[in-house]
Image: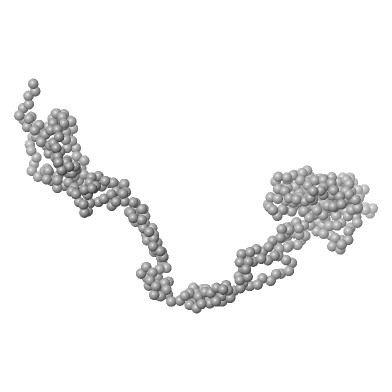
Amino acid sequence: MITVSMFEKGSLWRLCLIFFLLAISLLCVLGLSTDASAGSLDAPAAATAPGSAMYTLEDIYQRLSVGTAGTKRAGAFTEPGAGPTAGTGHTLDDVMTTAPAVDAANGATAASVLNTKTFWGLTSGAWGLQTGTMANNGAFGLACGATNQAVTAGYYTGGTLTGDADLVVGNIKTGIDIFGVTGTFSKANTVSGGQTAAAAGQILTAYSAFVDGAEVQGSMPNNGAFGLTCAAAATSVPAGYYGAGALTSVGNLAAGNIKTGFTICGVAGTGGYLSPVVASGSWPNPRFTIKYCDSGALCPDTGSGVGATDCGAFNSSDDVVVDNLTGLMWTRDAHLNSTAVWATQYTYATTTINSGSGFCGYTDWRMSTRAELVSLIDDRYNTPAISNTAGTAQWSSGDPFVSVQSSQYWSSTDHSVDTANVAWYVNMTGISGVMSGNTKVTFSYYVWPVRGP
Protein backbone atom coordinates (compact mmCIF):
# COMPACT_ATOMS: atom_id res chain seq x y z
CA MET A 1 0.00 0.00 0.00
CA ILE A 2 1.18 3.49 -0.86
CA THR A 3 1.06 6.06 1.96
CA VAL A 4 1.12 9.82 1.46
CA SER A 5 2.17 12.27 4.14
CA MET A 6 0.03 15.27 4.97
CA PHE A 7 2.71 17.54 3.54
CA GLU A 8 2.70 15.68 0.20
CA LYS A 9 -1.09 15.75 0.10
CA GLY A 10 -1.06 19.50 0.61
CA SER A 11 1.48 20.01 -2.17
CA LEU A 12 -0.47 17.90 -4.61
CA TRP A 13 -3.64 19.78 -3.78
CA ARG A 14 -1.94 23.14 -4.35
CA LEU A 15 -0.53 21.90 -7.66
CA CYS A 16 -3.96 20.83 -8.86
CA LEU A 17 -5.44 24.14 -7.78
CA ILE A 18 -2.80 26.11 -9.71
CA PHE A 19 -3.42 23.99 -12.80
CA PHE A 20 -7.16 24.59 -12.53
CA LEU A 21 -6.70 28.36 -12.18
CA LEU A 22 -4.34 28.46 -15.14
CA ALA A 23 -6.84 26.60 -17.31
CA ILE A 24 -9.60 29.02 -16.35
CA SER A 25 -7.30 32.00 -17.10
CA LEU A 26 -6.43 30.73 -20.55
CA LEU A 27 -10.08 30.19 -21.40
CA CYS A 28 -10.84 33.76 -20.38
CA VAL A 29 -7.90 35.22 -22.30
CA LEU A 30 -8.58 33.41 -25.54
CA GLY A 31 -12.33 34.00 -25.32
CA LEU A 32 -13.03 30.54 -26.67
CA SER A 33 -16.35 30.25 -24.86
CA THR A 34 -18.46 31.95 -22.24
CA ASP A 35 -18.71 28.58 -20.49
CA ALA A 36 -15.77 26.78 -18.95
CA SER A 37 -15.48 23.16 -17.91
CA ALA A 38 -12.83 21.83 -15.61
CA GLY A 39 -12.16 18.76 -17.71
CA SER A 40 -10.08 16.14 -16.04
CA LEU A 41 -8.83 17.24 -12.64
CA ASP A 42 -6.18 14.54 -12.59
CA ALA A 43 -2.59 15.70 -12.57
CA PRO A 44 -0.88 15.26 -16.01
CA ALA A 45 1.78 13.15 -14.29
CA ALA A 46 3.17 12.40 -10.90
CA ALA A 47 4.57 15.37 -9.06
CA THR A 48 8.01 13.83 -9.24
CA ALA A 49 7.80 13.36 -13.04
CA PRO A 50 8.95 16.04 -15.59
CA GLY A 51 5.65 15.52 -17.46
CA SER A 52 3.78 17.29 -14.68
CA ALA A 53 5.60 20.56 -15.45
CA MET A 54 3.34 23.51 -16.38
CA TYR A 55 3.76 27.21 -17.17
CA THR A 56 3.27 29.46 -14.19
CA LEU A 57 0.80 32.29 -13.86
CA GLU A 58 3.77 34.67 -14.18
CA ASP A 59 4.73 33.01 -17.51
CA ILE A 60 1.23 33.69 -18.83
CA TYR A 61 1.32 37.30 -17.65
CA GLN A 62 4.73 37.97 -19.23
CA ARG A 63 3.63 36.33 -22.50
CA LEU A 64 0.64 38.69 -22.66
CA SER A 65 2.58 41.71 -21.45
CA VAL A 66 5.90 41.64 -23.35
CA GLY A 67 5.84 38.41 -25.37
CA THR A 68 8.30 36.43 -23.24
CA ALA A 69 8.30 32.75 -24.27
CA GLY A 70 8.16 31.33 -20.72
CA THR A 71 9.80 28.15 -19.42
CA LYS A 72 8.71 24.94 -17.69
CA ARG A 73 10.69 23.19 -14.97
CA ALA A 74 12.92 20.45 -16.35
CA GLY A 75 12.97 17.99 -13.43
CA ALA A 76 10.70 16.78 -10.65
CA PHE A 77 8.52 19.22 -8.75
CA THR A 78 10.25 20.71 -5.72
CA GLU A 79 8.18 22.11 -2.90
CA PRO A 80 9.10 25.76 -2.38
CA GLY A 81 10.58 26.54 0.98
CA ALA A 82 8.56 29.75 1.33
CA GLY A 83 5.75 31.63 -0.35
CA PRO A 84 6.34 34.41 -2.90
CA THR A 85 7.45 37.81 -1.71
CA ALA A 86 4.69 40.38 -1.79
CA GLY A 87 4.65 42.50 -4.95
CA THR A 88 6.84 40.12 -7.03
CA GLY A 89 4.12 38.13 -8.81
CA HIS A 90 0.93 38.83 -10.72
CA THR A 91 -2.64 37.82 -10.04
CA LEU A 92 -5.38 36.55 -12.31
CA ASP A 93 -6.73 40.09 -12.32
CA ASP A 94 -3.40 41.26 -13.66
CA VAL A 95 -3.59 38.59 -16.37
CA MET A 96 -7.10 39.62 -17.39
CA THR A 97 -6.14 43.30 -17.40
CA THR A 98 -3.19 42.57 -19.70
CA ALA A 99 -5.11 40.24 -22.02
CA PRO A 100 -6.57 41.85 -25.21
CA ALA A 101 -10.24 42.74 -25.27
CA VAL A 102 -12.72 43.01 -28.14
CA ASP A 103 -12.49 46.39 -29.92
CA ALA A 104 -15.11 46.47 -32.65
CA ALA A 105 -14.53 50.18 -33.34
CA ASN A 106 -10.75 50.34 -33.67
CA GLY A 107 -9.65 46.75 -34.06
CA ALA A 108 -7.61 46.11 -37.23
CA THR A 109 -9.00 43.96 -40.04
CA ALA A 110 -7.14 41.94 -42.66
CA ALA A 111 -7.68 44.69 -45.25
CA SER A 112 -5.97 47.26 -43.02
CA VAL A 113 -2.79 45.20 -42.48
CA LEU A 114 -0.06 44.71 -45.15
CA ASN A 115 -0.27 41.52 -47.17
CA THR A 116 1.49 38.46 -45.58
CA LYS A 117 1.91 40.27 -42.21
CA THR A 118 0.24 38.69 -39.13
CA PHE A 119 -1.65 40.42 -36.29
CA TRP A 120 -4.05 39.63 -33.40
CA GLY A 121 -7.58 40.43 -34.43
CA LEU A 122 -9.66 42.31 -31.83
CA THR A 123 -13.03 42.29 -33.60
CA SER A 124 -15.59 39.71 -32.63
CA GLY A 125 -15.91 38.48 -36.19
CA ALA A 126 -12.17 37.99 -36.68
CA TRP A 127 -10.70 37.30 -33.25
CA GLY A 128 -7.27 35.76 -32.86
CA LEU A 129 -4.24 35.42 -35.11
CA GLN A 130 -4.95 36.89 -38.58
CA THR A 131 -2.99 37.59 -41.82
CA GLY A 132 -3.17 40.97 -43.59
CA THR A 133 -4.42 41.34 -47.19
CA MET A 134 -3.52 44.99 -47.95
CA ALA A 135 -1.78 45.19 -51.38
CA ASN A 136 1.90 46.24 -51.45
CA ASN A 137 2.16 48.53 -54.50
CA GLY A 138 5.86 49.36 -54.14
CA ALA A 139 7.24 52.82 -54.86
CA PHE A 140 4.85 55.60 -55.76
CA GLY A 141 5.59 57.21 -59.10
CA LEU A 142 3.16 59.45 -60.95
CA ALA A 143 3.37 62.75 -62.78
CA CYS A 144 0.77 65.47 -63.15
CA GLY A 145 -1.04 65.47 -66.47
CA ALA A 146 -4.03 66.80 -68.34
CA THR A 147 -6.24 63.86 -67.32
CA ASN A 148 -6.93 62.09 -64.04
CA GLN A 149 -4.78 59.08 -63.29
CA ALA A 150 -6.08 56.16 -61.28
CA VAL A 151 -4.22 55.34 -58.06
CA THR A 152 -4.52 51.73 -56.94
CA ALA A 153 -5.52 51.24 -53.30
CA GLY A 154 -2.88 49.74 -51.06
CA TYR A 155 0.45 50.37 -49.38
CA TYR A 156 3.24 52.39 -51.07
CA THR A 157 6.89 52.33 -50.03
CA GLY A 158 7.25 56.03 -50.81
CA GLY A 159 8.22 57.67 -54.10
CA THR A 160 7.59 60.88 -55.99
CA LEU A 161 4.76 62.80 -57.54
CA THR A 162 6.88 64.24 -60.36
CA GLY A 163 6.83 67.99 -60.74
CA ASP A 164 7.37 70.02 -63.91
CA ALA A 165 9.80 72.95 -63.97
CA ASP A 166 7.76 74.55 -66.77
CA LEU A 167 4.71 74.86 -64.51
CA VAL A 168 5.23 78.59 -63.90
CA VAL A 169 3.00 81.61 -64.44
CA GLY A 170 4.92 82.82 -67.50
CA ASN A 171 4.16 79.62 -69.40
CA ILE A 172 0.39 79.63 -68.78
CA LYS A 173 -2.11 81.78 -70.61
CA THR A 174 -3.40 84.77 -68.66
CA GLY A 175 -6.39 83.88 -66.46
CA ILE A 176 -5.89 80.12 -66.77
CA ASP A 177 -5.25 78.12 -63.60
CA ILE A 178 -3.28 74.87 -63.82
CA PHE A 179 -2.71 72.99 -60.55
CA GLY A 180 -3.11 76.20 -58.60
CA VAL A 181 -0.75 78.22 -60.82
CA THR A 182 -2.49 81.16 -62.53
CA GLY A 183 -0.93 82.18 -65.84
CA THR A 184 0.31 85.62 -66.90
CA PHE A 185 1.33 84.79 -70.51
CA SER A 186 -0.53 87.11 -72.90
CA LYS A 187 0.94 86.42 -76.40
CA ALA A 188 -0.10 83.63 -78.73
CA ASN A 189 3.54 82.99 -79.65
CA THR A 190 6.94 84.52 -78.99
CA VAL A 191 10.34 84.40 -80.61
CA SER A 192 12.95 82.76 -78.40
CA GLY A 193 16.45 84.14 -78.07
CA GLY A 194 18.57 84.01 -81.22
CA GLN A 195 15.61 83.14 -83.46
CA THR A 196 13.90 85.20 -86.16
CA ALA A 197 10.15 85.58 -86.39
CA ALA A 198 8.66 83.62 -89.30
CA ALA A 199 7.43 85.50 -92.35
CA ALA A 200 4.58 84.51 -94.68
CA GLY A 201 6.98 82.98 -97.21
CA GLN A 202 8.36 80.69 -94.53
CA ILE A 203 4.95 79.21 -93.69
CA LEU A 204 3.33 76.68 -96.04
CA THR A 205 0.46 78.05 -98.09
CA ALA A 206 -3.04 77.22 -96.78
CA TYR A 207 -1.61 77.29 -93.24
CA SER A 208 -1.32 80.13 -90.75
CA ALA A 209 0.68 80.67 -87.59
CA PHE A 210 0.73 83.16 -84.75
CA VAL A 211 3.93 85.19 -84.62
CA ASP A 212 4.31 87.55 -81.66
CA GLY A 213 0.58 87.51 -81.11
CA ALA A 214 -0.41 88.21 -84.72
CA GLU A 215 -1.76 85.63 -87.19
CA VAL A 216 0.38 85.25 -90.34
CA GLN A 217 -1.05 83.50 -93.42
CA GLY A 218 1.52 81.29 -95.15
CA SER A 219 2.56 81.77 -98.78
CA MET A 220 5.26 79.12 -99.26
CA PRO A 221 4.40 77.14 -102.44
CA ASN A 222 3.61 73.46 -102.02
CA ASN A 223 5.35 71.81 -104.98
CA GLY A 224 4.22 68.28 -104.16
CA ALA A 225 6.43 65.21 -104.34
CA PHE A 226 10.02 65.75 -105.43
CA GLY A 227 10.77 64.07 -108.73
CA LEU A 228 13.70 64.93 -111.00
CA THR A 229 16.10 63.00 -113.19
CA CYS A 230 19.74 63.83 -113.89
CA ALA A 231 20.38 65.20 -117.36
CA ALA A 232 23.20 66.78 -119.35
CA ALA A 233 21.78 70.25 -118.78
CA ALA A 234 20.90 71.82 -115.43
CA THR A 235 17.26 71.51 -114.37
CA SER A 236 15.62 74.45 -112.64
CA VAL A 237 14.15 73.62 -109.22
CA PRO A 238 11.48 76.11 -108.05
CA ALA A 239 11.66 77.34 -104.47
CA GLY A 240 9.10 75.97 -102.07
CA TYR A 241 8.12 72.91 -100.11
CA TYR A 242 8.56 69.40 -101.57
CA GLY A 243 7.03 66.22 -100.26
CA ALA A 244 8.88 62.94 -100.17
CA GLY A 245 10.06 61.79 -103.58
CA ALA A 246 13.21 60.79 -105.41
CA LEU A 247 16.00 62.05 -107.58
CA THR A 248 15.57 59.36 -110.21
CA SER A 249 18.58 57.16 -110.86
CA VAL A 250 19.41 55.36 -114.10
CA GLY A 251 20.30 51.68 -114.05
CA ASN A 252 22.93 52.13 -116.77
CA LEU A 253 24.76 54.82 -114.80
CA ALA A 254 27.69 52.52 -114.01
CA ALA A 255 31.44 53.05 -114.31
CA GLY A 256 31.78 50.45 -117.06
CA ASN A 257 29.26 52.29 -119.23
CA ILE A 258 31.12 55.62 -119.08
CA LYS A 259 34.21 56.44 -121.09
CA THR A 260 37.43 56.46 -119.09
CA GLY A 261 38.34 59.99 -118.00
CA PHE A 262 34.76 61.22 -117.76
CA THR A 263 32.48 61.48 -114.72
CA ILE A 264 28.68 61.52 -115.02
CA CYS A 265 26.59 62.38 -111.95
CA GLY A 266 29.51 61.51 -109.70
CA VAL A 267 30.29 58.17 -111.42
CA ALA A 268 33.83 58.05 -112.85
CA GLY A 269 34.06 56.10 -116.09
CA THR A 270 36.16 52.97 -116.52
CA GLY A 271 34.67 51.90 -119.84
CA GLY A 272 37.89 52.39 -121.81
CA TYR A 273 38.65 54.63 -124.75
CA LEU A 274 37.52 55.00 -128.35
CA SER A 275 39.97 55.85 -131.09
CA PRO A 276 39.51 58.90 -133.34
CA VAL A 277 38.55 56.71 -136.32
CA VAL A 278 35.39 55.58 -134.56
CA ALA A 279 34.38 59.13 -133.80
CA SER A 280 34.79 60.04 -137.48
CA GLY A 281 32.53 57.18 -138.54
CA SER A 282 35.19 55.30 -140.53
CA TRP A 283 36.08 51.63 -140.04
CA PRO A 284 39.79 50.87 -139.72
CA ASN A 285 41.50 48.50 -142.12
CA PRO A 286 43.06 46.42 -140.83
CA ARG A 287 40.96 46.10 -137.72
CA PHE A 288 43.85 44.73 -135.63
CA THR A 289 47.64 45.14 -135.66
CA ILE A 290 50.02 42.63 -134.06
CA LYS A 291 52.91 44.05 -132.03
CA TYR A 292 55.67 41.49 -131.49
CA CYS A 293 57.55 41.32 -128.22
CA ASP A 294 60.79 39.71 -127.11
CA SER A 295 62.38 39.46 -123.64
CA GLY A 296 59.57 41.48 -122.10
CA ALA A 297 59.71 44.42 -124.53
CA LEU A 298 58.57 45.39 -128.02
CA CYS A 299 60.81 44.05 -130.74
CA PRO A 300 63.03 46.68 -132.40
CA ASP A 301 62.11 47.99 -135.83
CA THR A 302 64.96 47.06 -138.21
CA GLY A 303 63.48 49.01 -141.04
CA SER A 304 61.67 46.13 -142.59
CA GLY A 305 58.72 46.55 -140.19
CA VAL A 306 58.23 45.28 -136.70
CA GLY A 307 57.57 41.59 -137.03
CA ALA A 308 58.54 38.15 -135.89
CA THR A 309 61.76 38.30 -137.87
CA ASP A 310 62.92 41.28 -135.80
CA CYS A 311 62.84 39.26 -132.56
CA GLY A 312 65.62 37.07 -131.27
CA ALA A 313 63.06 34.39 -130.42
CA PHE A 314 59.44 34.13 -131.49
CA ASN A 315 56.64 33.32 -129.00
CA SER A 316 53.12 34.48 -129.83
CA SER A 317 52.15 34.34 -126.14
CA ASP A 318 54.52 37.27 -125.52
CA ASP A 319 52.96 39.52 -128.17
CA VAL A 320 50.25 42.16 -128.00
CA VAL A 321 47.47 43.25 -130.38
CA VAL A 322 46.29 46.83 -130.93
CA ASP A 323 42.61 47.29 -131.78
CA ASN A 324 42.60 50.07 -134.39
CA LEU A 325 38.88 50.61 -133.76
CA THR A 326 39.15 51.45 -130.05
CA GLY A 327 42.85 52.12 -129.57
CA LEU A 328 43.03 49.47 -126.85
CA MET A 329 46.01 47.11 -126.53
CA TRP A 330 45.27 43.45 -125.72
CA THR A 331 47.48 40.52 -124.85
CA ARG A 332 47.69 38.41 -127.99
CA ASP A 333 47.20 35.26 -125.92
CA ALA A 334 43.61 35.22 -124.61
CA HIS A 335 44.43 32.32 -122.30
CA LEU A 336 47.38 33.55 -120.24
CA ASN A 337 45.75 32.37 -117.02
CA SER A 338 43.46 29.44 -116.25
CA THR A 339 39.85 29.96 -115.17
CA ALA A 340 39.46 31.33 -111.64
CA VAL A 341 37.11 33.32 -109.44
CA TRP A 342 36.85 37.07 -109.98
CA ALA A 343 39.28 38.18 -107.22
CA THR A 344 42.04 35.86 -108.45
CA GLN A 345 41.68 37.05 -112.04
CA TYR A 346 41.59 40.69 -110.93
CA THR A 347 44.88 40.23 -109.06
CA TYR A 348 46.44 38.53 -112.08
CA ALA A 349 45.42 41.29 -114.54
CA THR A 350 46.33 44.22 -112.29
CA THR A 351 49.29 42.95 -110.24
CA THR A 352 50.83 39.69 -111.40
CA ILE A 353 51.19 40.61 -115.06
CA ASN A 354 52.60 44.06 -114.14
CA SER A 355 55.35 42.76 -111.84
CA GLY A 356 58.98 43.37 -112.77
CA SER A 357 59.25 44.87 -116.25
CA GLY A 358 55.61 44.02 -116.88
CA PHE A 359 54.21 42.40 -120.00
CA CYS A 360 55.85 43.45 -123.28
CA GLY A 361 57.47 46.31 -121.35
CA TYR A 362 54.17 47.76 -120.07
CA THR A 363 53.17 47.80 -116.38
CA ASP A 364 49.71 49.36 -116.63
CA TRP A 365 47.70 46.27 -117.59
CA ARG A 366 44.27 45.85 -116.00
CA MET A 367 41.15 43.68 -116.05
CA SER A 368 39.07 44.64 -119.08
CA THR A 369 35.67 46.27 -118.60
CA ARG A 370 32.42 44.88 -119.91
CA ALA A 371 32.31 47.52 -122.68
CA GLU A 372 35.90 46.74 -123.74
CA LEU A 373 35.22 42.99 -123.99
CA VAL A 374 32.00 43.61 -125.92
CA SER A 375 33.95 45.81 -128.38
CA LEU A 376 35.72 42.65 -129.57
CA ILE A 377 32.46 40.86 -130.37
CA ASP A 378 31.53 40.64 -134.06
CA ASP A 379 27.89 39.58 -134.44
CA ARG A 380 28.58 38.07 -137.86
CA TYR A 381 30.39 35.17 -136.21
CA ASN A 382 30.10 32.82 -133.25
CA THR A 383 32.18 30.36 -131.27
CA PRO A 384 34.07 32.61 -130.98
CA ALA A 385 32.38 35.80 -132.16
CA ILE A 386 35.63 37.60 -133.14
CA SER A 387 36.92 38.68 -136.55
CA ASN A 388 40.33 38.17 -138.11
CA THR A 389 43.10 40.76 -138.33
CA ALA A 390 41.62 42.50 -141.36
CA GLY A 391 38.09 42.42 -139.93
CA THR A 392 36.81 40.65 -143.04
CA ALA A 393 36.36 37.06 -141.79
CA GLN A 394 36.06 35.01 -138.62
CA TRP A 395 39.03 34.67 -136.33
CA SER A 396 41.39 31.74 -136.66
CA SER A 397 44.32 30.92 -134.39
CA GLY A 398 47.09 33.46 -134.83
CA ASP A 399 44.95 35.85 -136.87
CA PRO A 400 45.55 37.98 -134.87
CA PHE A 401 44.91 36.40 -131.39
CA VAL A 402 45.85 32.98 -130.08
CA SER A 403 44.00 30.70 -127.64
CA VAL A 404 40.70 32.61 -127.75
CA GLN A 405 38.21 30.63 -125.63
CA SER A 406 34.59 30.21 -126.70
CA SER A 407 33.64 30.75 -123.09
CA GLN A 408 33.09 33.37 -120.41
CA TYR A 409 35.56 36.13 -119.53
CA TRP A 410 35.33 38.14 -116.31
CA SER A 411 35.04 41.94 -116.60
CA SER A 412 35.97 44.58 -114.02
CA THR A 413 32.45 46.02 -114.21
CA ASP A 414 30.34 45.48 -111.09
CA HIS A 415 26.72 44.47 -111.62
CA SER A 416 24.17 46.99 -110.34
CA VAL A 417 22.10 44.22 -108.71
CA ASP A 418 24.88 43.79 -106.09
CA THR A 419 28.01 45.82 -106.75
CA ALA A 420 29.95 44.19 -103.92
CA ASN A 421 29.37 40.57 -104.91
CA VAL A 422 28.29 40.37 -108.58
CA ALA A 423 30.27 41.29 -111.70
CA TRP A 424 29.57 41.22 -115.44
CA TYR A 425 31.09 38.60 -117.71
CA VAL A 426 31.15 38.41 -121.53
CA ASN A 427 30.63 35.15 -123.41
CA MET A 428 32.86 35.00 -126.48
CA THR A 429 30.66 32.41 -128.18
CA GLY A 430 28.25 35.18 -129.16
CA ILE A 431 25.35 32.72 -128.70
CA SER A 432 22.51 32.82 -126.14
CA GLY A 433 23.41 36.25 -124.87
CA VAL A 434 26.76 37.97 -125.05
CA MET A 435 26.92 39.15 -121.42
CA SER A 436 25.39 38.61 -118.00
CA GLY A 437 26.32 38.75 -114.31
CA ASN A 438 27.37 36.17 -111.74
CA THR A 439 28.66 36.08 -108.17
CA LYS A 440 32.37 36.80 -107.92
CA VAL A 441 33.22 34.09 -105.39
CA THR A 442 31.24 31.26 -106.97
CA PHE A 443 32.06 31.12 -110.68
CA SER A 444 35.44 30.61 -112.38
CA TYR A 445 35.98 32.33 -115.76
CA TYR A 446 38.89 33.47 -117.94
CA VAL A 447 40.50 36.91 -117.89
CA TRP A 448 41.81 38.95 -120.85
CA PRO A 449 44.14 41.77 -119.76
CA VAL A 450 43.99 45.12 -121.57
CA ARG A 451 45.68 48.51 -121.41
CA GLY A 452 45.57 51.90 -123.04
CA PRO A 453 45.02 53.15 -125.43
Q: Which image quadrant for residue 175?
A: bottom left
Along the line of sight, the residue nearer the viewer: 386 or 339: 386
The relative height of residue 264 versus residue 222 in the rendered view (above or below) is: above
Residue 322 image point, x, y percent: 85, 54
Residue 206 image point, x, y percent: 56, 73
Residue 140 image point, x, y percent: 36, 57
Q: Is residue 319 visible?
A: no
Residue 15 image point, x, y percent: 11, 34
Along the line of sight, the residue nearer the viewer: 23 or 273: 23
Residue at 67%, 64% (x, y): give it: 247
**Furthest-top residue in this view:** 1
The relative height of residue 179 versus residue 14 in the rendered view (above or below) is: below
Q: Quadrant of the N terminus?
A: top left
Tell me which colouring the rendered structure shows. Answer: one colour
Along the line of sight, the residue nearer the viewer: 394 or 447: 394
Q: Is residue 213 visible?
A: yes
Residue at 25%, 51% (x, y): give it: 108
Residue at 5%, 27% (x, y): give it: 5
Q: Which image quadrant for residue 187?
A: bottom left
The relative height of residue 417 versus residue 184 in the rendered view (above or below) is: above
Q: Is residue 29 left or right of residue 256?
A: left
The relative height of residue 179 versus residue 381 in the rendered view (above or below) is: below
Q: Is residue 297 left or right of residue 100?
A: right
